[in-house]
Image (spheres, rainbow, N blue to C red):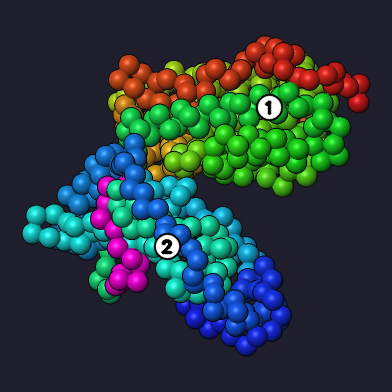
């Protein structure tokens, strides 16, 4: 939706007083809700306002980091004009939009994150010795225009004030200009249109700087509190016929109040739903005796996100079979963590986890072949029926960060200090899987930790969140408010 450009078409015929709905309509559609502004309103609306205070802030903490990233882009694309769009509002339905979320490459190269303006563009204009970089955005409208009171998408009366050019320039340490002065050209090299630039800005995020690592730690901290909140609320969650929704809501409350948002839709998957890897429908009950798999991550103001999964016994105690499955997944996660060292291929982390999954599922008699045969790269894979996803992905501004990086730099790349990635093996026995005994069916377990690679080896950023079966049971016993009815 955009009503930009529709700001000077106000019908000045005196009529009904303007309601708050008066201008909330997309340009060019029916005017059935639009109330013309009466003459008295139009005569007076532009006057009687105090001057906007001209605050010019100090550069934000991430400004020098973003400058170093822009320097890397400039050096790699000498003589080329580059355009990095922030992206636009996306329509949810009719005249309502999803909340704006800036493109990760834009946020990375500007430091403008949850406060970025939609439709902004960062432009690298080539010069004799590098690039002049300018950030174009829609500056705050002058009050002599009708935009500020009549435009539901960009008007100050509707969405709040936008910052002036000088303020953003000082805040980010980048030259700024009004979006109306931005020209695009046929030979512009644009992120998400040009493969080489898209790949470069994705690979530029593979190794995190100190600012990014601190932000990821913050995202983990908020997320850990969200998991504590869920554990504390288990009795209320069990009571509700859509307990999964309550789990999602409890986490959302923490993410919103302590951070910016969630980095992805929360997965609250109870009982057999845990076997659906990205179960975000979250409309089922949470039943004592089952496990609930919760995969959630708070995205903080800077847009860095955590990505953490814990699987809890709803009653507070694992059954024998649940514990066996859970501890096997933990064994796979620990094996993956032990394999993660600087200089090792990223894929070795996955392979270490899968070895445990193959060994245990073979031992339990679930595979039609030996573990060794299942692990054969060409003819095996039978164990992957129970864990079809990868063990790890990079994590940062995007939950699946650096997704446009070349395979040689990613799955087949070497682990380096500064990389942040998940370790998240799982075992999922679908409710109708005839290859496993009945008592395993409907059990899904995933344990997901966020890992920072350092010179000295891998460090778990999420290691303080209870992980072992014993720790998880003690966590529930400690935080759960009131007795859970384990008899149902
Ligand atoms: N947290 C969901 C995923 O990693 O795919
Ligand atoms: Mn993940």
Q: Badge 1: how crowded within 10 Å, few (<14), some, or many (20+)?
A: some
In the image, the segment drawn in magenta is 171-184
Task: Tell me whether circle 2 and circle 1 mark residues in contact (CB < 8 Å).
Answer: no
Local packing at callout 2 (Cα closer than 10 Å; few below 14, some 14-19, many 20+) is some
Q: Tell me the residue that label 1 is attached to.
A: 229
Relative vertical location of residue 69 with respect to residue 8 in this rendering, above or below: above
Q: Is residue 264 visible?
A: yes
Badge 2 element: loop
Q: Residue at x 25, y 71 (%)?
A: 187
Dot 1 falls on a residue whose secondary structure is helix
* Name of the residue lying farthest toward the bottom: 13
Residue that lies at the very extreme toward the left in this rendered image: 128
Badge nearest the viewer, 2 or 1: 2
Disc 1 residue lies near ligand 1 with CB under 8 A = no
Position of residue 242 measured from the top left corner of the image (x, y, whole percent): 81, 41
Asked if residue 67 lies left or right of residue 137, the reply is: left
Q: Nearer the viewer, residue 4 or 220?
A: 4
The answer to which of 224 and 176 lies nearer the viewer is 176
User: From this viewpoint, which residue is outermost toward the front?
Assistant: 48
Marker disc for residue 140? 2
């Amino acid at each position: 939706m955009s009503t930009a450009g529709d700001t000077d078409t106000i019908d000045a015929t005196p009529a009904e007083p303007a309601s708050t709905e008066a201008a909330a309509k997309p340009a060019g559609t029916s005017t059935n809700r639009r109330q013309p502004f009466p003459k008295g309103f139009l005569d007076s609306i532009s006057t009687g306002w105090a001057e906007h205070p001209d605050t010019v802030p100090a550069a934000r903490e991430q400004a020098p980091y973003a400058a170093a990233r822009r320097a890397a882009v400039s050096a790699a694309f000498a003589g080329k004009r580059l355009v990095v769009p922030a992206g636009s509002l996306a329509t949810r339905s009719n005249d309502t939009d999803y909340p704006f979320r800036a493109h990760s490459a834009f946020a990375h190269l500007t430091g403008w994150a949850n406060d970025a303006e939609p439709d902004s563009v960062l432009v690298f204009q080539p010069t004799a010795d590098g690039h002049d970089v300018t950030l174009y955005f829609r500056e705050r409208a002058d009050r002599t225009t009708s935009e500020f009171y009549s435009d539901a998408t960009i008007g100050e009366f509707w969405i709040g004030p936008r910052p002036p050019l000088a303020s953003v320039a000082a805040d980010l340490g980048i030259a700024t200009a009004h979006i109306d002065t931005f020209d695009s050209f046929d030979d512009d090299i644009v992120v998400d249109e040009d493969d080489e630039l898209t790949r470069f800005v994705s690979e530029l995020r593979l190794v995190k700087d100190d600012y990014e690592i601190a932000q990821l730690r913050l995202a983990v901290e908020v997320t850990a509190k969200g998991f504590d909140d869920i554990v504390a609320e288990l009795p209320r969650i069990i009571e509700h016929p859509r307990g999964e929704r309550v789990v999602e809501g409890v986490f959302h409350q923490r993410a919103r109040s302590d951070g910016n948002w969630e980095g992805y839709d929360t997965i609250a998957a109870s009982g057999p739903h845990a076997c659906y890897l990205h179960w975000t429908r979250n409309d089922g009950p949470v039943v004592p005796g089952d496990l609930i798999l919760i995969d959630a991550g708070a995205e903080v103001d800077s847009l860095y996100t955590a990505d953490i999964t814990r699987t809890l016994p709803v009653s507070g105690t694992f059954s024998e079979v649940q514990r066996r499955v859970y501890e096997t997944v933990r064994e796979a996660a620990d094996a993956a963590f032990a394999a993660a060292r600087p200089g090792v291929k990223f894929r070795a982390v996955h392979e270490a986890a899968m070895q445990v999954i193959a060994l245990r599922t073979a031992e339990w008699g679930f595979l039609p072949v030996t573990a060794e045969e299942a692990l054969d790269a060409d003819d095996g894979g039978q164990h992957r029926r129970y864990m079809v996803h990868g063990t790890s992905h990079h994590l940062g501004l995007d939950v699946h960060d650096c997704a446009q990086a070349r395979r040689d730099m990613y799955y087949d790349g070497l682990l380096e200090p500064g990389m942040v990635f998940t370790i998240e093996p799982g075992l999922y026995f679908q409710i109708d899987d005839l290859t496993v005994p009945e008592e395993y069916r409907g059990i899904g377990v995933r344990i997901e930790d966020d890992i920072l690679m350092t010179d000295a080896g891998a460090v778990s950023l999420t290691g303080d969140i209870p992980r072992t079966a014993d720790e998880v049971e003690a966590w529930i016993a400690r935080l759960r408010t009131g007795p859970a009815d384990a008899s149902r």
